[in-house]
Image (spheres, helix red, strand yellow):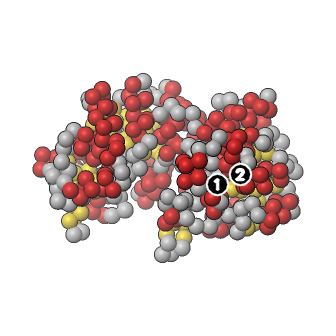
Amino acid sequence: MKYGINTLDDFKFSGKTVICRLDLNSPYDKDKAVLKDTTRIEAAVPTIKELCSAGAKLVLLSHQGGDLEYGNYISTRLHSDVISKMLGGLVIFLDDVCGPAARNAIKELKPGQILLLDNVRYMAEEMTLFETKLKLTPQEQTKTQVVQKLAPLADIYVCDAFAAAHRDQPTLVAFEYLLPSAMGRLFEKEYEVLSKIMVSPDKPCIFCLGGAKIEDAFDMMPKVLKEDIAGKILTSGLLAHVFMLAKGIDLGAPSIEIIYTKKLDVYIDKAKEILASYDDKIILPSDFAYNDCGSRVELDVKNLPSQFMISDIGTKTISSYKNEIARSKTIFVNGPCGIFEKTETELGTKEIFSFIADSQSYSVIGGGDSIAAVNKYKLTDGFSYICTGGGAMVRFLSGEELPVVKALKYSAGKIK
């Protein structure tokens, strides 16, 4: 047991039917009908291998996309093909989640066999809107269809979906109330790495925060600044834009419109509160870049507002951020510096991420877009640890006990 949670070392799996909840959610190319990045799938393989080698009858569950991001809301059939190739053996796939076909297939599993069921978010009770609107307790979620139909067929539940540990959904938090449960090897490792940053990071420690998904960052920043976990926060992306607006700096209509369209304007007041206490620790860009008909154009903050949408940090900012990074011993990264998918606006992300990867500092990076950038620039070996989680990682660092962690701790205590 670690951190009050059972690990795979606490159970014998031979001949047992094991439900293993993973987070295989991956970027998807609709035009080519392929998964663009398989980092999360690769990260899940060690736990899958260990359970199979131990003789488990293994049932895999995962989501792919969701009701709030319908663009990559697809079947997990592609994921079964990827896992099969990685394992060098067949993974059975069934386009059912908990219906008669799924239940019969589970009953027929033999030790060492793997069955991947379809996207759990095809079930209404696994959707984000179900979670946020009904707010059911884990005990209430044990009454949902997916849990009621699958739990009686299993002996043990394993959660290796740290990237989804901040979600409060039946396949993540309810099985623990009905079955002996453990965290998988990936979950265990990510918990350990983030705990180290929370408890005893080597100083100076800086946080590089950017990207477009900035909501959780506003809960995390006051915590890491107040407790001196982060000495400074280097901002970029929409996070920097919100702080600039909080300072009364006019970015220009196109950039401001993005903030309001994404409903991030609610964080302007929160940014003001953070600046009131930690203005010297929140480092903002001194220049920006935008895409003007295929050409990269940079402008100084004093030359704002811009008639173009700001899409990257500028070279002056890149240089000053590198200086801060060079003085640091621990670096935490979440979110790219700009729109790295386009050549004209990838410089900030490419330069900053490459500089961190080349440094001797302990570096942790996480989040789907960040991982995609790391893979694009072939920097995987340069980072000390690449965390599969984005939202879960940030919320963990905010000091919040994640719903899945609570459920796993409940199960461990119950077994005791």
Q: Earlier in the sequence, mark 1 or mark 2?
A: 1
Please tell me which residue is depicted at 77% across the width and 52% down the height of the picture.
Answer: 148
Crowding around mark 2 (Cα neighbors within 10 Å: few <14, some 14 to 19, many 20+) is some
**Pointer 1: what residue?**
125
Residue 8 to residue 119: above or below = above
From this view, report whether residue 88 is shown above or below residue 401: below
- Between 44 and 138, the one lying in front of the other is 138
Identified at 83% across, 53% down, the residue is 153
User: Decide: marks 1, 2 in contact (CB < 8 A)?
Assistant: yes
Q: Which residue is mark 2?
A: 144
- Residue 53 in sight here: no
Q: Which mark is residue 14?
A: none
**Quadrant in which the C terminus is drawn:** top right
Residue type highlighted by circle 2: Thr
Q: 40 and 97: which one is in front?
A: 97
Q: Position of residue 215 (x, y in %)?
A: 41, 44
Q: Quadrant of residue 184?
A: top right
Residue 168 placement, left or right of 348: right
Quick one: which residue is furthest to the bottom in this view? Answer: 31
Position above or below: 222 against 111: above
Point out residue 261 in the picture as x, y percentages from the top left corner: 33, 56
Q: Residues within 10 Å of mark 1 (few under 14, many from 20)?
A: some
Residue 159's spot in the image, x, y percent?
68, 45
Measured Cα–Cα span from mark 1 to mark 2: 7 Å
